[in-house]
């Protein structure tokens, strides 16, 4: 080490920092061989450690699993210890001066236990506090290196481990899953070149165009500050006061009042990156991109009355659904679609691609399916993984870059910043769930709760004592796309095209089926009914007039109000020419999994056709559905033939809303007993009201009659969702019932208000 100065006479990276050279990144100072580093370094920097990997995770392995083994604890067969590893003799009693005496200050075991408990909670996320997550992988279908050098797309079949967290936005950590709300869809890719977080939502647009308004939006949405109400709901004055003064929110409001905001399952909703991003290839060429996740389970939703009742019956409805599906091996899958377009194409659009309140209709740029996301493993520990995971839009990798979307730019700051207070300091990237699988080498040091034991005395760059390591990657590293900037005056403002607030809201409305339109009207009506200040209702209506007259009329009449004058437009530019985009309808994606994971209740009482129940149960199970034998009480019921059935859940613990369909089997006495239990009558009425398929065998039909359920639709035609059967033809009826179940709901039955 004596001749270091002679060996590295100057900082080879220096010239690249100035002038035009800064535009073409240098290759960087790269060690030519390992001996080169060894001879240029002190001994301490180069003693190998078994914990140091080669930075090259194997392809095709879900390697978030093994790295986490380092920190997994399993107490099976182990003795209780303190946090210092000291064995504990007695975990029942504190140390006292005599059996009836005071507890002693010296009881370090009690004090450690209570102190840790006192600090068990961390601040919840300011938004998206309520969430559920799972591990899995992303598999690329293609080699996309012509458009991006992003590691996950390097070759067909390449698998990149992921951790995905779904969430609601408004509610607190313990709030209900089925609130009307946007859902978060955040994906952390643990790529070979570091972590990439795609922090999206289940709705492809946003309420506001500029990050400057985000705190205002969230303050208006969250429970009102004086009384902390309402929880997990946008149906209150401050939210509608704000959005009705912010017409740019109109497009997002259409989505938020639609069934998109009450999904049947996290597994049955789309995800979107929302912003326009850039893809950049190895040659430094860039295209624009929008990211879409499409569920193979189809896109399905609840109805509002059902969502409200599920909040009471099972506030963990979505969390439980995701957990149980993965435990059962029914791994949810989404395909990743890209909308790829050039800057020149974008210039020709009738909207600005930097405006997060606009979609790029698939009619302009079709989706290209490039890979698949599979969630196949539940977390081991909710807090360690789901709560501590930190998604940040700033986490991009070579090949993925930003655009000048002003909403995105604020986010690039906000997410890293919020983790500092939420997770307690600058080392949150070392928490196992956040640690990249790619190796981390830099000169950042110290701070609260530092985990890494950095070796050697070099913690700066440039250095010669460490052989220049860790060295800059140059072109191998992340290189910001050299987007041209134009010299303009500094200004707080927006481009002119951002001022069109209504044409895409109208496009959305015009692309919905009549059923979906009715639900959107119902969504606005409910929310605005909860608004107490008439002027706020009226101002919202004045926005709806600009979207569609029939929408505004229907909502106004639902509120008992007159339709006001339209809100003045912010621009008089001519509106876009395309009128519909069929993919915007939820019903456009029925799914590819049949009746897998659909929950079916079979209502029983003494005297039921037990053999028939067993046949129906086995047949549903064989097709992947989840049947449950439901009765007034737990225990057993005795069938007409003397055979007994085990009851799996009672009517009070497993009410109608947590099932997708119901079967009332044959059995005269069983049907009569059920008809005397109002819980059973409510059960079938709500199945009917929520448009769920109903199968009745023989005397089972009497329960529907007792509940006042009509056998025909209002036009007199038979209800296609009520499948009647005799025990002899039960097989054919079962096939019809399964077909109806795969269709999700029997919308032809729906009416507003409900008839039953
Ligand atoms: Fe955000 C969390 C999605 C705009 C600031 N956001 C958060 C999460 C999701 C989104 C899915 C939860 C991540 C997780 O599961 O931990 N946010 C979005 C989308 C947006 C958006 C799709 C618009 C396109 N967000 C947005 C803006 C800002 C933030 C404009 C601030 C300027 N978001 C945050 C945050 C959160 C967050 C305060 C709260 C907790 C966290 O970040 O980690 O930083």
Image (cartoon, grey):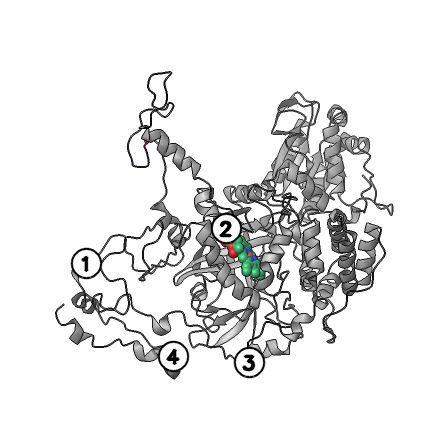
**Quick one: which residue is furthest to the left in this view?**
2
* Camera-nearest label, 1 or 3: 3
Write down which quadrant ligand 1 falls in.
Answer: bottom right
Q: Can residue 267 be seen in this view?
A: yes
Position of 721 with respect to 198 (left or right) is: right
Say whether disc 2 or disc 1 marks the residue closer to the N-terminus: 1
Say whether disc 2 or disc 4 marks the residue closer to the N-terminus: 4
Q: How far apart are marks 2 and 1 (CA)?
A: 42 Å
- Residue 75, located in which quarter of the rendered image? top left
Mark 4 and mark 3 residues within 8 Å of each other at the beta carbon: no
**Residue at (40, 80) in percent of width and height:** 23
Q: How far apart are marks 4 and 3 (CA)?
A: 22 Å
- Bin the neighbour count of mark 2 within 10 Å (Cα to Cα): few under 14, some 14-19, many 20 and up: many
- Bin the neighbour count of mark 1 within 10 Å (Cα to Cα): few under 14, some 14-19, many 20 and up: few
Question: Count of labels shown?
Answer: 4
Residue behind mark 4? 22
**Quick one: which residue is furthest to the right in this view?**
716
Residue behind mark 3? 488
Residue behind mark 2? 375
Q: Distance between the residues labelled 2 and 3?
A: 47 Å
Above or below, 201 relative to 233: below
Residue 638 coordinates in the image, percent (x, y): 66, 21
Which quadrant of the rendered structure holds the N terminus? bottom left
Give the label on residue 58, or none. none
Q: How far apart are marks 4 and 1 (CA)?
A: 34 Å
Closest to the observer, 286 or 142:
286
Which segment is the magenta one? 80-86
Say whether disc 2 or disc 3 marks the residue closer to the N-terminus: 2
Residue 81 magenta-highlighted: yes
Residue behind mark 1? 44
Q: Distance between the residues labelled 2 and 4?
A: 42 Å
Residue 64 magenta-highlighted: no
């Amino acid at each position: 080490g004596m001749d270091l100065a002679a060996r590295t006479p100057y900082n080879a990276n220096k010239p690249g920092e100035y002038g035009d050279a800064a535009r073409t990144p240098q290759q960087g100072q790269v060690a030519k061989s390992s001996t080169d580093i060894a001879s240029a370094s002190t001994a301490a920097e180069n003693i190998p450690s078994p914990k140091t990997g080669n930075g090259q995770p194997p392809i095709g392995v879900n390697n978030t699993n093994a790295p986490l083994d380092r920190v997994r604890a399993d107490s099976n067969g182990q003795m209780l210890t303190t946090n210092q590893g000291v064995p504990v003799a007695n975990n029942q009693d504190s140390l006292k001066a005599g059996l009836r005496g005071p507890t002693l200050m010296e009881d370090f075991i009690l004090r450690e236990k209570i102190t840790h408990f006192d600090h068990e909670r961390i601040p919840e996320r300011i938004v998206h506090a309520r969430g559920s997550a799972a591990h899995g992988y992303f598999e690329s279908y293609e080699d996309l290196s012509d458009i991006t050098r992003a590691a996950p797309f390097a070759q067909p079949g390449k698998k990149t481990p992921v951790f995905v967290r779904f969430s609601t936005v408004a509610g607190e950590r313990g709030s209900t899953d089925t609130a009307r709300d946007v859902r978060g869809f955040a994906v952390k890719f643990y790529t070979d070149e570091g972590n990439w977080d795609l922090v999206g939502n289940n709705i492809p647009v946003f309420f506001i165009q500029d990050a400057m308004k985000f705190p205002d939006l969230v303050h208006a949405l969250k429970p009102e500050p004086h009384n902390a109400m309402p929880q997990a709901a946008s149906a209150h004055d401050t939210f509608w006061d704000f959005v009705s003064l912010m017409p740019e929110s109109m497009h997002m409001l259409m989505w938020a009042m639609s069934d998109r905001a009450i999904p049947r399952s996290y597994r049955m909703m789309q995800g979107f990156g929302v912003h326009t991003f850039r893809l950049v290839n190895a040659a430094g060429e860039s295209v624009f991109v929008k990211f879409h996740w499409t569920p193979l389970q189809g896109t399905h939703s609840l109805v509002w009355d059902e969502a409200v009742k599920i909040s009471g019956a099972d506030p963990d409805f979505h969390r439980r659904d995701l957990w149980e599906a993965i435990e059962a091996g029914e791994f949810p899958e989404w395909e990743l679609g890209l909308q790829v377009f050039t800057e020149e194409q974008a210039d020709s659009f009738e909207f600005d691609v930097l405006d997060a309140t606009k979609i790029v209709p698939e009619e302009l740029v079709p989706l290209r399916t490039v890979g698949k996301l599979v969630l196949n493993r539940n977390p081991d520990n909710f807090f360690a993984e789901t709560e501590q995971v930190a998604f940040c839009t700033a986490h991009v990798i070579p090949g993925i870059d930003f655009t000048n979307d002003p909403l995105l730019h604020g986010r690039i700051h906000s997410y890293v910043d919020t983790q500092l207070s939420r997770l307690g300091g600058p080392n949150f990237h070392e928490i196992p769930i956040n640690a990249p699988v790619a190796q981390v080498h830099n000169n950042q040091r110290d701070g609260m709760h530092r985990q890494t034991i950095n070796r050697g005395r070099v913690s700066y760059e440039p250095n010669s004592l460490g052989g220049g390591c860790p060295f800059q990657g140059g072109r191998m590293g992340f290189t910001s796309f050299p987007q041209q900037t134009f010299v303009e005056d500094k200004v707080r403002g927006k481009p002119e095209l951002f001022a069109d607030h209504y044409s895409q809201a109208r496009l959305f409305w015009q692309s919905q089926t009549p059923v979906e339109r009715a639900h959107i009207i119902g969504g606005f009506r409910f929310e605005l009914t909860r608004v107490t200040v008439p002027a706020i209702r009226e101002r919202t209506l004045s926005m709806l007039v600009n979207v569609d007259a029939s929408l505004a009329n229907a909502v106004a009449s639902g509120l008992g109000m007159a339709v006001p004058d339209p809100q003045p437009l912010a621009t008089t530019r001519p509106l876009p020419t395309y009128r519909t985009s069929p993919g915007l309808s939820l019903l456009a994606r029925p799914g590819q999994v049949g009746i897998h994971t659909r929950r079916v209740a079979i209502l029983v009482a003494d005297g039921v056709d037990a053999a028939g129940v067993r046949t129906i149960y086995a047949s549903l199970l064989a097709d992947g559905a989840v049947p449950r034998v439901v009765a007034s009480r737990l225990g057993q019921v005795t069938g007409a033939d003397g055979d007994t059935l085990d009851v799996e859940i009672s009517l009070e613990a497993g009410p109608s809303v947590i099932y997708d369909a119901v079967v009332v089997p044959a059995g005269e006495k069983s049907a009569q007993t059920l008809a005397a239990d109002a819980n059973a009558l409510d059960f079938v009425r709500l199945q009917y009201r929520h448009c769920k398929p109903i199968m009745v065998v023989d005397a089972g039909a009497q329960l529907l009659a007792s509940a006042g359920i009509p056998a025909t639709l209002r036009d007199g035609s038979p209800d296609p969702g009520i499948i009647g059967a005799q025990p002899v033809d039960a097989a054919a009826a079962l096939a019809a019932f399964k077909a109806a179940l795969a269709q999700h709901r029997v919308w032809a039955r729906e009416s507003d208000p409900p008839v039953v």
